[in-house]
Image (cartoon, rainbow, N blue to C red):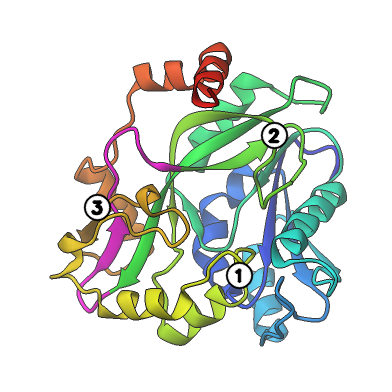
Amino acid sequence: MSSAVIKVGFCVAYDWELLKSSVPRLYDFADSICFSLDMNRRSWSGKKFDFNYQAFRKWLEELDVEKKIKIYEDDFSLDHLSPIENDNRQRTLMAKKMGEGGWHVQVDADEYFFDFAEFKKYLLKIYPNPSGNEKPINIACNWVSLIKKTTSGYLYINNNPNQYEAMAFATNRPEYLHARRNSHFDHLSPFFVLHDTWARGEQELLQKINSWGHDKDFISKESYFNLWKALDEFNYKYIFNFHPLKGETWQQLGYVPEHSIDKVIDWLKENNKLKIDAAYLIKRNNRFYQKIKQFLGNL
């Protein structure tokens, strides 16, 4: 796998069926793909989860016609580590498994690229085939988070233009200090990723918020869960600053009258709901400007 340029890694767990929507959107454009799975079927917080390995393998055999996907099983849930430390460790070990060099892209099962083909071209313009010895850089994308599936569509995070929640997806130096975050410079790309973070059934959502890497950071689970249960396609417009850890990250909610992931993405594109300006990106991605901004913010 080390000779590949575009290496994509997935942390696989109880919600593996979401891979059915995530992987096909990038499969043709990745040189190699790694699925890392806890050998004891435990989450980062140490909780056991059900996993239908037979169904998983059957789907994988049908999908992986080019034989570019490798499964890496290891103990990714160590009792002496916190959930986020186990998160960091799994991502780090998976990157090592994929080998040095190339672009390391880590995608979660609940993340669906709008256009991975163009994202790949964007990466290759920055470094055609990074060795890992270049100046380290992360390439971030703009998240559009799905919050709830209703009887007639989806509720999603509808932030103002140029104010989307960003996540580092690709890096030429895979070092994971807080999930996919590290100390490298985050270069924001113009690409969007649909994040199916909360649009799940009640039991599955409860399992997620009790199993994810932020388990210890989320101290108001029951209250927040009750608020989520009350949301619908009528009252969503009254909810602001909704993020459970940092409220203003999710400014407001929007509504998409579609029922499938592909149609949600198409609807967001067709209705021009997502806007990020080229001028904003130039300023945002200027290292000197960001250093000055950080310096002034620390005064």
Give the farthest residue toward the front.
299
Q: Position of residue 133 (x, y in %)?
A: 84, 23
Kindly report the distance in space between the C-alpha atoms of the residues bearing marks 2 and 3.
35 Å
Q: Position of residue 151 (x, y in %)?
A: 22, 79
Q: Which residues are magenta?
A: 150-165
Residue 154 part of the magenta-drawn span: yes
Q: Which residue is mark 1?
A: 215
Q: Which residue is mark 3?
A: 267
Q: Mark 3 is on which residue type? A: Trp
Mark sitting earlier along the chain (1/2): 2
Residue 27 in sight from this viewpoint = yes
Is 213 on the left-hand or right-hand side of 200?
right
Q: Nearer the viewer, mark 2 or mark 3?
A: 2
Identify the disc placed on residue 157: none
Identify the disc placed on residue 183: 2
Q: Mark 2 is on which residue type? A: Ser
Give the farthest residue toward the left.
234
Kindly report the distance in space between the C-alpha atoms of the residues bearing marks 3 and 1.
33 Å
Q: Mark 1 is on which residue type? A: Asp
The answer to which quarter of the image holds residue 13 is bottom right
Q: Nearer the viewer, mark 3 or mark 1?
A: 1
Q: How many numbered circles are shown?
A: 3
**Within 10 angstroms of label 1, few (less than 14), some, or many (20 or more) residues?**
some
In the image, is residue 260 above or below residue 247?
A: below
User: What SS does tag 2 mark?
Assistant: loop
Q: Position of residue 247 (x, y in %)?
A: 38, 54
